[in-house]
Amino acid sequence: MFVSHLQVSDFRSWEQADLVFEPGPNVLLGANGQGKTNLVEALGYLATLGSHRVATDAPLIRHGAERALVRAVAVNEGRELRLELEITAGRANRARINRAPVPRPRDVLGIVRTVLFAPEDLALVKGDPGERRRFLDELLVARTPRYAGVRAGYERVLKQRGALLKTAGSARRAGGSGDIRTLDVWDGHLARHGAELLAGRLDLVAEIAPHVANAYAGVAPESAPVVVKYRCSLGAATPNSEVGGRADREALEAALLEGLAGIRSQEIDRGVSLLGPHRDEVELILGEAPAKGYASHGESWSYALALRLAAYELLRRDGTEPVLILDDVFAELDRRRRARLAEVAGAAEQVLVTAAVPEDVPEELAGVRFQIADGQVSREP
Ligand SMILES: Nc1ncnc2c1ncn2[C@@H]1O[C@H](COP(=O)(O)OP(=O)(O)OP(=O)(O)O)[C@@H](O)[C@H]1O
Ligand SMILES: [Mg+2]
């Protein structure tokens, strides 16, 4: 697929911007702080309903404005879909597809598909486990939008169960026993939703791991090989049975339920859920050691790049080419890695590249050019 139009109003620094993109390379050029990343962030938001830079929506709305608007036209095998998203801080967003309002914003997921690689991605390797879990979950949703509901359901359960554990903890400290029956019910919810998310992640890691290893060997052939592993908070109790070549959801649910029963007292003491996919880790191993804390800066960059390239490869194999977005990344890469990335990007159905100066854009990606300055976008003839 490719995106033929992007229009934003009151998004970040932009009062108004209107871009007509072409298939193949589209390069956004402009000095620091002119709003290049803001534009690709808007497109990324349409694809994931999240920003690669911030966790909340408020910073996405232009200072002083009430709400931001992002509109795009996605073209998939000749078929056009018009998407519109209204972002209001602290309230539910509203979405339209072909001008018709849809019940939930997440109904737009899966229409615009993007793989965005940006300097922030270093956190995939060096950051907290939450960064790596988010990487998996976003890819899961991009491939199978149904997982947006699974994720939201699980988050809801965690919140409610957390509140209940805190109440039970206070009751216990006051000499009572708390509402154990209700807790049993929430254990069941956590195990059910958790198992579904967990099964999705386990399957995804099994599928993506060889692509990450391949992509890494491609960008850093002189380096030690990499291995990606999923480490479940169930530890040794994680079932590894499969049904039809996929993770066994029922076995995972049973194992979670049993695990929860074993740690209930501890959970009540601490007032938090200690078991489930929100406590899991995606191990990124380089040679013999975890990349986090051991890998060099260049190796960490290559690892992050390999994760994104692998995601791109999986989405492609699913049958819809995602838009590849490369935000200010070429300046960070050495010659070999630049060349490797340029090769992949040059073959993409559509790629959006941002850079401060044209010298940072490899020749393979000479395409349509936009100059971004003083709140204006001008397309070069
Ligand atoms: N909510 C907002 N309202 C108004 N301005 C904002 C908002 N959020 C960010 N900005 C402004 O947007 C600018 C940054 O834009 P952006 O990150 O897109 O720059 P860029 O062109 O990618 O620069 P660089 O080359 O440094 O990456 C900053 O000047 C910042 O103050
Ligand atoms: Mg930028």
Image (cartoon, rainbow, N blue to C red):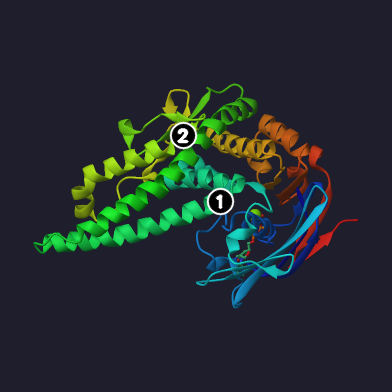
Q: Position of residue 141 (x, y in %)?
A: 56, 48
**Where ligand 2 lies, by image quadrant?**
bottom right
Q: Secondary structure at mark 2?
A: strand
Q: Position of residue 35 (x, y in %)?
A: 68, 61
Q: Reading the chain from its start, which is encountered first: label 1 or label 2?
A: 1
Q: Residue furthest right?
A: 381
- The amino acid type of the residue labelled 2 equals Ala
Q: Position of residue 71 (x, y in %)?
A: 71, 64
Relative to 315, does residue 31 appear above or below in the rendering? below
Q: Secondary structure at mark 1?
A: helix
Choose between 328 and 242: the one closer to the eye: 242
Q: Which mark is residue 247?
A: 2
- 3D distance between C-alphas at marks 1 and 2: 17 Å
Indicate the quadrant containing the C terminus: top left, top right, bottom left or bottom right: bottom right
The picture quadrant where one finds residue 24 is top right
Q: Which mark is residue 146?
A: 1
Tell me the crowding category of disc 2: few under 14, some 14 to 19, or many 20 or more residues within 10 angstroms, Cα based.
many
Q: Residue at image x 47%, y 56%?
A: 152
Whether residue 128 is visible: no
